[in-house]
Image (tube, rainbow, N blue to C red):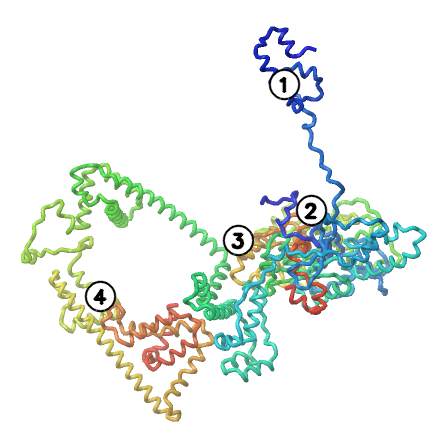
Amino acid sequence: MASGRDVRDMLGLPMGVDAQKSAVQKRAKAAAPVRRIQGVAREVAALYGERPPPVAVYEEKKAYRAKRQNQGPAKKWVQQPFVNQARVDGLILKHWRRKPTIAPPVQDGEDAPMEEGDNVEPYIENSGDFLKYSIQVDLPTFTDEEYDAYLRSDDWSREETDYLFEVVKDYSYRWAVIWDRYDYQPANKSHLTQETVNGDASQALATLPFAPPKQRTVEDLKARFYHISAKLMKLRIPEMQMDAEQYTLYETLSKFNPELEGNRKLLAAALMNRSMDEVKEEEFLLAELQRINMAANRLDAEREELRARLEHPSANQQVSAGLASFTSSQALQALFSQLFAQDRSKKRASGGATGPSRISLNTNDLIQTPSSANAQLSAAARRQSMATNQSAQTPVRTLSPQQEYRYNVSTHDRLTSGVTFGSDKLLKMRQAKSNVQTQKIAAALAELGVSEVISLPTIKVAEVFEQLIGKVGKLLDVRKVREKEEGESRVLEQMKQRRSSEVQNGDASMSNGTSVEPQAKHEVPDSQEQTPGLDGEGEADDDDNDNDGDGDAHGDGDGEVDADAEGEEDDEDAEGEEDSRVPSETLSRAASTAHKRSASVLSQGSIQSSKRARK
Amino acid sequence: MNTLNSSTAPAAGEYAGDEVSAIVLDPGYSTIRAGFAGEDVPKSVCPSFYGQIEDSSQYLFGENAIHTPASNLQIKNYWGSDGIVEDWDTAAKVWEYAITSRLTGARAGDPARNGLNDDPKQENGEATDVDMETIENQEKPLEESPLLMTEPGWNPTKAREKAIEIAMEEWGTPAFYLQKTGVLAAFASGKASGIIIDVGASHTSVTPVLDGMVLKKGVQKSPLAGNFVSNQIRLGFKQSQPEIPLTPHYLVKSKTPVDAGSPAQAIYKTFSVPPTDSFRHYQEERVLTEYKESVVEIWPGPGRLSNGTNEEIAKSMPGRPFEMPDGWNQVFGVDRFRAAEGLFDASAALTDDANPRPKDEHTLPRLVQAAVQHVDADQRPLLLQNIVVTGGSTLLYKFGDRLNYEINAIYPSTRNKLIAPGPVVERKYAAWIGGSILASLGSFHQLWISRKEYEEHGANIVEKRCR
């Protein structure tokens, strides 16, 4: 047999490495069975030598998919009875499961049915797979004592509160659903009347058997629930010990404002019910807004570019002196905004529409012609800070006070742009914020014999005139306060007279109470509309002031008097509080009526009307 | 997690599936759908109409029985005019037929006992046992399967209690649950919240659903639905010049082709005792259904059909031919738009003495508006984003387009999205499919009302548990 070795020998190939090679070959041979190519005779394979065959020979075995592994007979499935752990009643249902492999030993044909017949109670799976889906909501709970002590409400009976909690639990805080399903029927009337006998009078009113079932809004339900939750939370954990999360929760619960919510909902509904035209208009406006924003962005980008260029001014010595103040970017920004404002005012004056292009022109000027820029800049600098920055460029001659006085030199922290007449300044001082006040000042000046037109409106005259005006203002304030006090005393006297006329009641406090009562009763039902008018007691005073003619009573401060200050306090209080507290509001009002009556009685109608107009 | 498609099964744990071979029963005015939970179409769809031989208590159920002309055969329906089951006794029978005819049959017994493998010698001994067992099986057809039933959104307590009574007492189901069709239709579209517009045969309902719960105040229903459209077509046929004849299939023996509009040349069948009026009416309905499916079209908008030049445009559109069973045929032009216009525009409905003008608030746009109006303002945009359209009558051509137009006209500022599944089966059987999904969930097991609970609390438990 010719082996590779023989062939080599025949062809005269070198045999020098033969010893080594043969060893390698031996080893390869030993490993050969793996590489063994089937279907080729051993002799032929031997002819290949070490070189691989020129044509790829694939092994049959690997070319085909592996045979499906046979794992014995088909697996059996059974309808496995199981109980769900989430259920308490032990309902047994069946689902398909692989038959457990440790099957009971197979009996022979005859025995099997007997066995199964006996085996009435087969293995029942205890399935807890879906236990995690059984979720209960947690709800604040309260005891009877707690309810009596803290949670009573005139508007809600205990039964209805319990019902509310039940519904909230049933529908897991889905308020829209809760409101949809909320249908409280006062259970049995006899029980209720029983309670009214036991309960106090206010409770009785809410639970009277003939009271019709109330239509509660979502906000009502939420308000009651949140109110109780907040109170209970505070009872369980004192405010001081709450952690941040608890406190924010407490805040949201206690600060819930049903009216605000209701108004928001109204607005939301109105937004939804808009007509096609309104929607289109809004779309148009939005598009417009976007356009404007884009323009603004472009403008900003241009400004940015300008600023970037101004960061590196050319190293011109002459300019540098004038530009000394502009080395920092902040100063440059200020300069730029000033330039921009100038440019805008010019544009407005001319009515031209060359906004951005004009700016860019300006910047070009600045960059390209340093000399002109210098002029502009220095002008701007002078204008901006004449007193501070001038020294660097022009020699300053200091004047003595006498000289200053003589030449009428004055220094200013800030100068308004443009030229004004001194007479304008005087005229301006005559003007107060309100018309009436202006008239009063004018009257006072006429009384003093100061003529309307002052012939020489120099600065000194202006100073003196300003002082005079200040004094007149104070005088007027004092007069107004006096008038008010007088009015109040007048009213009190009237009240006194009336009281003395209805002597039958005798008790002064009683009569006060009765006089307030009907008002309060009248106002409670439509609380939503009336509350602002009520809580604005202090504001009413302000209105009164306005009628008197003084608009800046707040600003003056020094002329302020007790009554006014109190009124303001009340005003702030009222606005800080929730609007819902109408009853307490009316109470406090009743308490302070004696004091406040003057204003409220005198201008009751006007207050209401002005309030409404304001709203 | 890779996205699911129809060819890959979801991995275990990916969905909370745990099938307990529950049966889902979805009765409607036209058909009753029943099948096993977890399947994608109801296996058994039976007509709700049943036949009764006059003056006898012999009932005929199923398609095959009630379409065969027989003398004295009255075709009836157990539903009342207000969308609530009226004739409970028969309803239970029809439902039972729907379940037992295809789903549960006689149970496969133990092979050792069912008699098939017995030695002939021993037969007499075992036979009595087998009989007893089958009798028991027949008595309680649902002993093996929990039952999920659907109900309309306005179902009163009485009807609900009656349903659980039937399921528990008569059928012996181990567990029962009652769910509203609206919720289930939403589930079928993969939504937990939305407005479900269901235009069925007898009623159109609009149901707002939030987190899988019906908002009862918002549920709206109206009688303007498939049957109303059929009546409109009948009216249209009657009022047209010349009158269009309506001949049901069973009367025709053979026909010869005729030109459009010319009288039919057909040989009619003769009956010694002619079938009853109700039978004829029911057979006519089948022809009208065909007409609805192939000819009737809804004006897709913009505007109503009567607006401006819309009618002119409709006239210029190519007509659709229809051939009656007796060979009479015609190409229908603008008339085909008029039949269903009443669903959207009450003033466009055809009227006569027997069919007064429908109320404005019964038209679809008004129903949707009323439903939305009764929902908390915060939820309205969410609901309008998920408007699920279901029911056989919504398959009317261009129905979706028109509805979309009408809703956008009412609420232009919100994003209104109509979800109308394309496949016919999903549109017609949405409530059943939703029920099938629901009842095959493992997490649903805790909601079933078990027999034990029913026995403890009585039928009223359905009010507490299924809300």
Q: Where does label 2 land, which residue?
A: B320
Do residues under tags 4 and 2 come within 8 Å of each other at their CB atoms?
Answer: no
Amino acid type assigned to the residue bearing label 4 in the image: Gln
How much space separates mark 3 and mark 2, taking CA atoms?
35 Å
Q: Position of residue B205 (x, y in %)?
A: 64, 60
Amino acid type assigned to the residue bearing label 3 in the image: Arg
Q: Is residue A403 left or right of residue B2?
A: left
Badge 3 element? loop
Residues behind callouts 4 and 2 on a single chain:
no
Give the mark toward the camera: 4 or 3.
3
Do residues under tags 2 and 1 come within 8 Å of each other at their CB atoms?
Answer: no
Do residues under tags 4 and 3 come within 8 Å of each other at their CB atoms?
Answer: no
Could you classify mark 1 by the number of other residues whose Cα lies within 10 Å: few (under 14), some (14-19), or many (20 or more)? few
Amino acid type assigned to the residue bearing label 1 in the image: Lys
Q: Which mark is residue A431?
A: 4
* Along the viewing direction, whichever of B266 and A156 lies nearer the viewer: A156
How much space separates mark 2 and mark 1, taking CA atoms?
89 Å
Q: Where does label 1 land, which residue?
A: A26
How much space separates mark 4 and mark 3, taking CA atoms?
55 Å
Give the mark toward the camera: 4 or 2.
4
Residues behind callouts 2 and 1 on a single chain:
no
Do residues under tags 1 and 3 come within 8 Å of each other at their CB atoms?
Answer: no
Badge 4 element? loop
Q: Where does label 3 land, which residue?
A: B415
Give the mark toward the camera: 1 or 3.
1
Badge 1 element? helix
**Residue at left offset 40%, top offset 85%:** A513
Could you classify mark 2 by the number of other residues whose Cα lies within 10 Å: few (under 14), some (14-19), or many (20 or more)? some
Specify the subunit that label 1 lies on.
Answer: A
Specify the subunit that label 2 lies on.
Answer: B
Specify the subunit that label 4 lies on.
Answer: A
Q: Position of residue B392 (x, y in %)?
A: 68, 53
